Image (tube, rainbow, N blue to C red):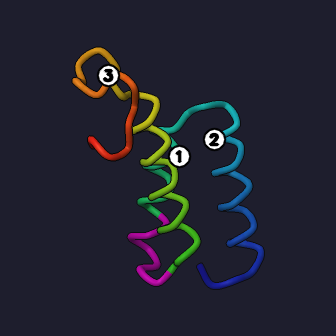
Amino acid sequence: MKKADDRDDFLQITNKLISEQRFGEAINYLQKIIDADKKNKKAIALKEQIQKILEYLNRDLFGSTNLDMDPWLE
């Protein structure tokens, strides 16, 4: 990522994938960005956010003994 245009492009592509709920593709795309530029803090933060969203979406409520979603029991 060397230009501001490139940064805007990667944000637009990532936002499109997220809006279409194609989270796996968005993570893969962001990982390619991070591999090319290890210091890209926006890509790193966005990837972490998407992974948290997926953790929440894939949470198995009935597999947990904390059915009331009490944060103190997690």
Q: Quadrant of the N terminus?
A: bottom right
Dividing the picture into quarters, in which one does residue 21 lie?
top right
- Seen at 63% across and 40% down, the residue is 17
Percent coordinates x, y for residue 22 in the rendering: 56, 33
Q: Which residue is mark 1?
A: 26
Q: Is residue 49 left or right of residue 66?
A: right
Q: Is residue 26 left or right of residue 68?
A: right
Percent coordinates x, y for residue 11 in the rendering: 69, 60
Instruction: Pick the residue in front: 61 or 27.
Output: 61
Percent coordinates x, y for residue 18 in the rendering: 63, 41
> What segment is highlighted magenta in the picture?
33-39
Distance between mark 2 and mark 1 Cα atoms: 7 Å
Q: Earlier in the sequence, mark 2 or mark 1?
A: 2
Q: Which residue is mark 2?
A: 18
Amino acid identity at mark 2: Ile
Q: Which residue is mark 3?
A: 60
Amino acid identity at mark 1: Ala
- Seen at 53% across and 77% down, the residue is 41
Dividing the picture into quarters, in which one does residue 68 lie?
top left
Q: Is residue 49 above or below residue 43?
A: above
Whether tag 2 and tag 1 are in contact, CB under 8 A, the answer is yes
- Seen at 47% across and 68% down, the residue is 44
- Seen at 69% across and 49% down, the residue is 15
Count neighbours of disc 1 (C-alpha within 10 A) and say few if under 14, some if 14 to 19, many if 20 or more.
many
Q: Quadrant of the C terminus?
A: top left
Helix or strand or loop: what does disc 1 sit on? helix
